[in-house]
Image (tube, rainbow, N blue to C red):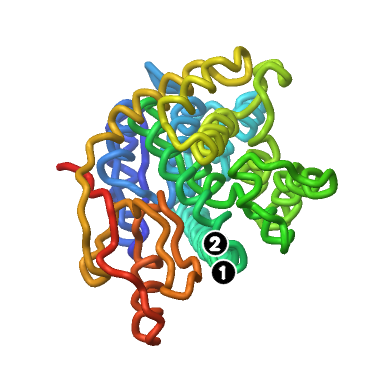
Amino acid sequence: MTEKILFVDDEQNVLDGIRRGLRKTFSLETALGPVDGLQAVNKKGPFAVVVADLRMPVMDGIKFLTRVRERSPDSVRMILTGNAELESAIKAVNEGHVFRFMTKPCSTEVLTKILNIGIEQYRLLRSERVLLEQTLKGSIDLLTEMLSMLNPEAFARASRVKRHATEIAFYNLGLTEIWKLETSAMLSQIGLMTMPGLNLEHIYKGRDLAPEEKERYDRHPLVGFELLNRIPRMEEVAEIIRCQEQRLDLKDGSLPIEARILKVVLDFDLIQAREGNRKEALEKLKMREGWYDPAVVEALERNLERDQQYRFRRVEIEDLRPQMIIKEDIRTIDGLLLISGGQEVGPAIIERLKNFKESNRAIPEPINVLVPLK
């Protein structure tokens, strides 16, 4: 049995007794008190099952298991205590999301049976998580690939937005959990996939649209929301995309931080496409008082200063590498748009260009790129 179990108690003799009774059956770790227990979770985890005493100094078992849940959400949490008040049991289940509430003394036979049930629950949770993650990743990959084929301009814009949004979140706003932002940015234009014939070049260049065209374009965040809200675990991403074009002053500050970031970056990208100048685009954002989260605008400005740390190069397709930035549109000799300028090079872009080149569709080389300075 490879899954590990952690027992936490403030009495060493209790831990010694548990170790003697269970060490031949389970892969067992013990910790003397909640502080040592959290250190064990951080350094020796993940644990399939974590069992804690209810009454411990510094931090009781409920608070301890709540902390464990934050660090290791799949670990099955249990209480083993000599204080079996009903109120404590209810609190443990509600606050610590405790799987079992056991009382001392607990025989080795009963404890072994309950721990085995806990391990099976852990395996079930892990298998469900892996399945969901694989399904989620596959869905995202499929949608982005479809967007790249059906609407290259929209895909290019999403790629630019993702790069700026994740950089300002990570480097300038100090956000570390950015998977929702990355996914939302990459899928920010997914609603346009259902709108064939919509002239995005007119939109990006600021040309007048027919009323029905403008109405269709304005609906694309809602269309994206409706598409993504059907996918398990994508509800939050769908909500971010629904809110991505909403002004802060019209929402009383209630927009998710990811939506506030996307609003700034999407507007900046659109203004820059029309004006062709980063500085002017940034100044126009600043003039729209109340529209945006000021912290996000400041973060974008700092990132643009950081973003200048590139050198210009001309490279052959074979020399393209990840993290390079495509400086200008890449088209075939006969005018077919392959890659829009501003995209960060990744495996999919390299593969696409190589495939076109091998199919004897002429692509002008070398390609103009920006290479990040080390």
32 on left or right of 218: left
Tell which of 82 and 353 is nearer to you: 353
* Displayed quadrant of residue 267: top right
Residue 80: x and y in percent read 48, 37
Q: Secondary structure at mark 2?
A: helix
Is the C-beta separation of discs 1 and 2 under 8 Å? yes
Residue with the most extreme bottom position: 359
264 on left or right of 93: left
- The answer to whether one can see residue 128 in this image is no
Residue with the most extreme left position: 374
Q: Circle 1 is placed at which residue position? A: 149
Q: Circle 2 is placed at which residue position? A: 152
* Displayed quadrant of residue 140: bottom right
Residue 179: x and y in percent read 47, 45
Vertical arrangement, residue 319 with respect to residue 79, above or below: below
Q: Which residue is painted at 49% across and 43% down in the image?
A: 161
Report the amino acid beneath label 2: Pro
Q: Which residue is painted at 36% across and 26% down in the image?
A: 172
Q: Which residue is painted at 41% across and 44% down in the image?
A: 163
Q: Quadrant of the N terminus?
A: bottom left
